[in-house]
Image (cartoon, helix red, strand yellow):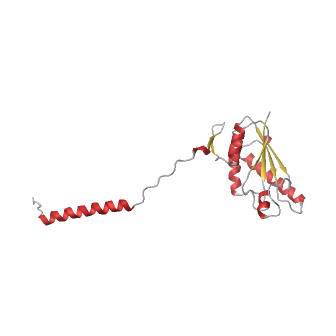
Amino acid sequence: MKRLTFGLGSIVAIVLTTMLLVKVYHLGQAARPPLKTAPPPDLSSVVALPNGSVLTAPQGTVGRDMVDWLASSDRSERLFELGGREFDGRSIEPTIESKVRIGRGIEILKAHPDVTVSVIGYTAATSDPAADLNLSRARADWIVNALHDGGIAHGRLTAEGRGGADPIGNNSTPQGRARNERVAMLLRHDR
């Protein structure tokens, strides 16, 4: 067996190389940005429904307003505008954003089987009130069918069209007309 021997120069070279590697490692660590951790989740938007299901409904949203009202002792009826951009122009089918809100509404209604829903369709007012009325009714029917397809009994649902009545936006501006292309849900507790 052969014995390894190192001269003083070899030992110095090994020590200096090791010190250099340690220095480079520490410099690399210092140059790295610190790891970012995600902020803690905002659990105030998570609500438990009476049927045991859980829903995300941030404060200030229609869904949260519905959950809070249904959890209160208020037994009067209440109108909820779905909000947001509900329809593209004079379409019957809601936007993707509205469909997400409808899904949340289904979960809320499933948890409150004592609540009936009147879906009210609206349009921006045009020079053809009969067409406005037909379109608003078709929108309400579409929503009622979506709620029923989601598991809400037909006996709890009604649809109504009001055309260009009750505008919430100015019909003389594109933004106002877009706000008027909407549906609302009137919720009532069964007595």
Residue 100 against residue 117 in the figure, above or below? below
Q: Is residue 146 above or below residue 5?
A: above
Front position in the image: 9 or 122: 9
Q: Please give left or right for residue 43 compared with residue 141 in the image.
A: left
Residue at image coords 38%, 62%: 31
Query: Residue 129 is drawn in which quadrant?
Result: bottom right
The structure residue drawn at horizontal position 71% and vertical position 36%, both measured from the top left corner, is 72
Q: Position of residue 89 (x, y in %)?
A: 78, 62
Give the residue furthest to the top. Answer: 191
Q: Is residue 125 above or below residue 59?
A: below
Quarter the N terminus occupies: bottom left
Locate residue 83, reporting x and y percent.
73, 53
Residue shown at 74% from the left, 47% from the top:
147
Position of 131 compared to 71: left or right? right
**Is 34 on the left or on the right of 139, as rendered?**
left
Place of residue 116 in the rendered image (x, y in percent of width and height, measured from the top left): 78, 40
Total marks drawn? 0
The quarter of the image holding the C terminus is: top right
* Residue 126, quarter of the rendered image: bottom right
Q: Is residue 47 left or right of residue 128?
A: left
Q: Measured from the top left, where is residue 111 in percent x and y? A: 69, 39
